[in-house]
Each structure stands twice: as C-alpha cells, then as structure tokens.
Image: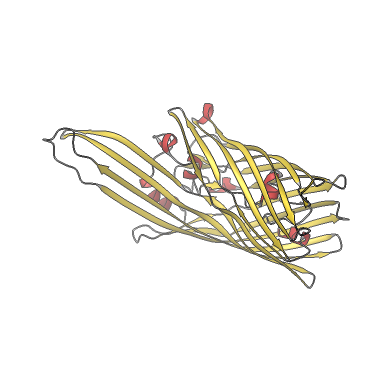
Amino acid sequence: MTHARPVLAALSALILTIGASVPLSAQSPFTAIGLGYPVPPVDARSAALGSTGVGLLGDNFTLRNPADLTQHRTPGFNITTAPERLTVEAIEGENSTGRQGLSVVRAVVPFRGFVASFAFGSEFDQDWSVAIVDTLVLEAGSYPVEERREQDGGISAIDLSLARQVGPLSIGFSAQRLIGSVRQSFARRFDLPLDPASPSLGDVVDSRVASYRAWRFKVGAGFDIVDRVLISGSYGWAGDLTVDPQDPEIPSGEIDMPSVVDLGASATLTRNILLTVAGGWAGWSRVDGVLADVTAYDARWGGAGIEYRGLRLLGLDVPLRFGGRAAELPFAPEGAAQATETAFGGGLGLEFRAGLAAADVALEFGRRGDLAETGLEESFRRLTVSFTVRQ
C-alpha cells in the first residue's frame, strides 16, 4: 500500500491550520480535518429516531444494513435532503454559516422473494471556506490584503443491495462504490498600498483538485419476531481508498479504509408505540499517521428513539417521533483530543393514500467539539426532509 501522507500533505499546502483564523470565518472546521465530516446516510424517519436506521421495524431507506430491505413489502422510492445551519465558536469569536446536500436517494424493488435496491448516499462532507481581511506590512510598504481559501467536495457511495427473508431470518449484501473529489483554491488580492510611493503587488491565485475511489462491501442479517421485534446488524469492509491528484507532480496515494459494524433493534410495545435503539463502530485508528497533520481515532455512535402512530390529522396518519444520539468524530488536528457530537430532536410524518406517499421531517439540535478543551466548538440545527412514493 502506498501511504497517502505525501498526497494529502501536498494538497493541504494551501489550507490554513485550524489554529490560524479558521474558526472565526470558516465553514465547519470539522470538515477541514482528514476526510471531512462523516454524514449519516439516513432518511428523515431514522434521523428523528436518533439516526438509528438499523433493526428498525417498518420500511426505511437508510444505507446501514442491507438485510433490513426485507421490511419493504412494495416497491418504493425515497429522496432525502438534510440542510444544516451552523454556529462555529472559537476563542476569537463566533460565526454562523450553513451547508446543504442530499443524504440518501434510494429505489427499492421486491421480486420473487428477494428485495433489490439501488441507492446514492453521502459519506463525508469536505466543504469549507475562509475569508481573511488584513494589512500586510513589508519593507516596501503596507498593503491591504483580502485572502480567501476554499475547499469544495466530499465522498459519496453508490450502493447496490440485495436481501432475502427465510422465515424470521433475513440476510442481505451490498456492494458500494465510493466516489468523490475535492477542489482546494487559494486567492490573495492586494489593494493599492497605503503609501502612494510604494510599488503595487500582483494578485496570487492557485488551485488543486483530487479525486477519490474505492470499493466497500457489506453483509447483514436480521431476526424478525412476528413483526413485533426486529434485531439486526451488519459488517462492512473496504479496499484502499485511492486519492488521485489531478497534478502530474503529485503521486497518487491510498488510504486503508476501516471495517464498520452497525447493530440495532426495535420493538412494538403497543399498537401505536415503537421503541428503537442502535449503535455502531468504525476502526478509523488504522489510518492514524497516514493523513497529514491529522490524528485518527476509532469512532463509535449510538442512538435511541420512540415513535407514536396514534395521531390522525385531516384524515391523514401523522406519526410522531423523538430521539437522541451521540457520536465520536474520527478525525482531529494532530495531537488533539477526539471530538464528540451530541444531538436531540424529533419529527413527524404525513402519510397519504394509506401510505402510498409520505413526507417526513426531522429537526435536530446538537453540538460538536468542546471550546474549553480544543478551542473549537459548533452548535448546529439540522432539518432532514424525506419524500417517499410506493406502488
């Protein structure tokens, strides 16, 4: 395996370090570390239930466990978007920003005892930007300068899954193609010098682009007890993630991707009340020392939620959901402690024509990092919206 440190070190040459003005005027600083911020590939129902989506009774469109596809009894299509509003806090002050993007797009088709699925899901977000206005003092004079550094990109998964149920047991398999790219740009614009006798300085502009590609596979199993209790889990493994800079002077590199485990369960306590709990682990510490200026940690997550399905409004079924979750983030600045994320929220659904069409909404309030420990912290509000049609 070719280590990716030379690749990412070269790509990071244009990026400000986290301690140098980034927190005050940037997008989420957690997207500027390592491979970025991990985006949960969940639909709005799962997001409202603590971002679980494993062992969840009733059809859901998350990409956590292919065996859960057997919960789908009819063909369906779902599209989920998850815009987020952030307040980045640092010792120097705070700044508000936001981001948006698709979380999951998935089509599900049962046929001849099997359930097949084709999907697109988010994996990592790497979007951020920094704007700095300052005065550069040189021997030749003083120059007002505006500097902008941007990073645009991320990693997504194209997923093909197949599942089958035999009695109470369901099994599933997924093949995922991880793809993506990242573009880093740098621009420095000088205004006229404060002293008219000083010479003018020319602007500086540069950019670099890299692409990502890898294969990942998942196997999953579930056990359904008369449609009242579901227990399921999955295991995923991947090949090397190839980082391919579009620059002949920078060699390609590879990152040894970690194994992933997800487990979950849900139970129908009464006709209208469902409880669910889930968690997972990803072995990201295996890439520690490979990514430039980054410490990598194993990352765990856990969530739980409750769903109430007894409410009707204007003739429509309106399920109510509440949940919470906690997660460890895999990447931190070199030598820094691991950052954690916590969130609480809820949501509801609107089901039309006996469930043949549905709109689901989840709103989460959460926090990442710790200002006292690392000098970085951000609060966020995430709105997850799903639209589903079924045959």
Q: Residue at x 73, y 62 (%)?
A: 172
Give coordinates of residue 74: x percent, y percent.
Answer: 76, 65
Side of 169 where 293 appears, left or right: left
Give coordinates of residue 126: x percent, y percent.
Answer: 48, 49
Residue at the limit of the structure toward the front, as seen here: 314
Side of 37 where 311 appears, left or right: right
Rendering colour mode: secondary structure
**Camera-side residue: 316 or 284?**
316
Q: Residue at x 40, y 56 (%)?
A: 209
Q: In this figure, what is the number of numbered marks?
A: 0
Side of 259 where 152 appears, left or right: left
**Quarter occupied by the C terminus:** bottom right
**Camera-side residue: 312 or 287?**
312
Note whether 101 is above or below 328 in the view shown. below
Q: Residue at x 72, y 49 (%)?
A: 349
Give coordinates of residue 137: x percent, y percent.
Answer: 22, 32
Side of 348 where 122 appears, left or right: left
Give coordinates of residue 377: x percent, y percent.
Answer: 52, 33
Residue at the limit of the structure toward the left, as seen here: 197
Q: Residue at x 77, y 53 (%)?
A: 232
